[in-house]
Amino acid sequence: MGSMIKQIQVLMAVAAFLLIGRATVAQDNRANLPDAPAPKQDQTGAAQKQDQTGAAQKPDKNTWQTPMGLITKKSFFYPELATTPGSLSSLQKFELFLDKSISPPQILSSAAAAGISEARGTLAGYGQGGEGFGKRFGSSMASGSSSHFFGTFLLPAVLHEDPRYFVKLNGGFRARAGYALRRAVVIRTDGGKEAFNWPGTLGPLAAEGLANTYLPDSERTAGKTFERYGIRIAFSAGNNLLKEYWPTIFKRLRIGKVAPGLGPDTTQPAPPGGSPN
């Protein structure tokens, strides 16, 4: 456990160094976010004149028809679900890394992995019983945190890519499932374009390489490292499918406490013909 704590301390030190170096650039970039454009003077004047004359206003677009309208507040279960189209600063990416490292999916998956590992007798160097389960759970949490550090903060900050998951919302199951799987290899840039998902592919690999410093000796081989890497990539792709349908599930279940803004007390009208797929 001591080695895992040292690894986390190293990650924090690197993060602090990078944040200091990118602080000025991040502040400049946030001024040009697409979701906060500076209105032109003539447009503002025209809008005020129209309001004063009582002219009819165009009806607002149904917010349930767009992902940004459906996901209005940060998700407790999946903090990486995007709530705005604007890009994140380096500091916000670092905060997202911290949130994902202690999110329910990370804790639940680490506990499940520890239980399965103990039942199957893998990671034999950790032993059995409560101590063995604790070591397995701790190593899984540490490798998950490392993966989020590289894949959610460090690489996205350096490559100017957005580590969040942008829900497609519209379309049938085939279209949405294909989109969810595609997001495993395609990522959105800070400028709103698409690029190869280097953070999502290199981040887990770096984390599994780092895990060789605290896993049992039997796991510190190239074959074992790439085996764990493949499992992590496959899990990430499958997890994207649950992320895609997570807001819709909680909207239909109307669990307002878990998904704020999606409960029965919402004032947004339902879309014509029922809820979107």
Image (spheres, rainbow, N blue to C red):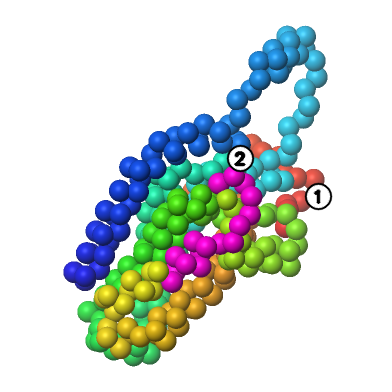
Locate residue 72 relative to residue 59 in the image: left or right.
left
Locate residue 237 relative to residue 67 in the image: left or right.
left
Q: Earlier in the sequence, mark 1 or mark 2?
A: 2
Mark 2 is on which residue type? Thr
Q: Label 1: how many residues lie within 10 Å, few (<14), some (14-19) or many (20+)? A: few
Q: Quadrant of residue 54?
A: top right
In-front residue for pair 240/93: 93
**Pointers 1 and 2 in contact (C-beta within 8 Å):** no
The span shown in magenta is 190-205
In-front residue for pair 258/91: 91
Secondary element type, mark 2: loop
Quarter of the C terminus within the rendering: bottom right
Locate residue 50 relative to residue 83 in the image: left or right.
right
Secondary element type, mark 1: loop
Q: Per the image, is 204 magenta?
A: yes
In-front residue for pair 194/139: 194
Q: Which residue is mark 2?
A: 266
How far across and down, in percent of the image, does residue 102 sit? Answer: 37, 59
Q: In the rendered image, is residue 65 in sight?
A: yes
How far across and down, in percent of the image, does residue 31 sit? Answer: 52, 31
How far across and down, in percent of the image, does residue 252 sit? Answer: 64, 54
Inter-mark Cα distance, 1 to 2: 18 Å
Residue drawn at x 38%, y 74% is 208
Mark 1 is on which residue type? Gly
The residue sitting at the left extreme is 2
Q: Which residue is mark 1?
A: 273
Q: Label 2: how many residues lie within 10 Å, few (<14), some (14-19) or many (20+)? A: few
Residue drawn at x 30%, y 58% is 11
